[in-house]
Amino acid sequence: VFTMSAYPLTPHQLAELKRTSNNKCAECSSQNPAWASVSYGIVICLDCAGIHRGLGVHVSFVRSITMDDWSSDQFDRMMRGGNDKWNEYWAKNASAAELASCNVTDNVVDRKEMAQKLKAKYESEIARSYRELLSLADGASRG
């Protein structure tokens, strides 16, 4: 059985992970997010991480940036992703109705409403295709 080694992120990796586009939550724009969705290569805050965890690992695999161990494949996927890349992909491919109904940055303060919007966003065909794109890149990087 093949097992993947996993270790805490190094200070250099932490700095790489929090590069410019990842210095705030990909969902609500909170500063200094400490969690990540490896599935999308995005960095998120604690509240949004809780919502992502509720979506299930088949939709969003969530890790703590500082408390969890990371495999090299997980870290590499984060480097191929990024908050800007995911948000640009979503904006480019979502319909106007999807953009409006899944927008969580405009005065959404109710956690239940935010969870509903994120569920719709991440269970969409667009989100599934983005996960697949990152997965294809996973295979290509292994070569």
Image: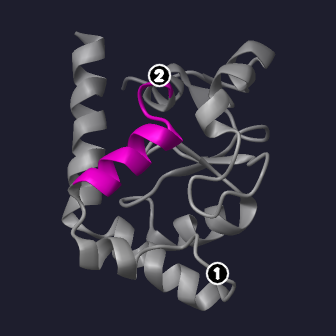
Which residues lie in the magenta part?
Answer: 79-92
Whether residue 9 is visible, yes or no, is no
Q: Residues within 10 Å of mark 1 (few under 14, many from 20)?
A: few
| Residue 13 placement (x, y as % from top left) | 68, 19
The residue closer to the viewer here, 18 or 137, is: 18
Does residue 105 appear to the left or right of 40 in the view shown? right
Does residue 33 appear to the left or right of 94 in the view shown? right
Label 2 secondary element = helix
Q: Specify the label residue 136 is tagged with.
A: none
| Residue 114 placement (x, y as % from top left) | 56, 81
Type of amino acid at the residue the image marks with label 2: Asp
- Compared to 79, does 109 lie above or below? below
Residue position marked by numbered label 2 in the rendering? 76
Disc nearest the viewer among 1 and 2: 1
Instruction: Give the mark nearest the N terminus, 1 or 2.
Output: 2
Q: Residues within 10 Å of mark 2 (few under 14, many from 20)?
A: some
Distance from disc 1 to disc 2, alpha carbons, whole Å, reads 33 Å
The residue closer to the viewer here, 95 or 13, is: 95
Q: Residue at x 41, y 26 (%)?
A: 80
| Residue 112 placement (x, y as % from top left) | 59, 90
Q: Residue at x 66, y 89 (%)?
A: 110
Which image quadrant: the N terminus? top left
- Compared to 141, does 74 lie above or below? below
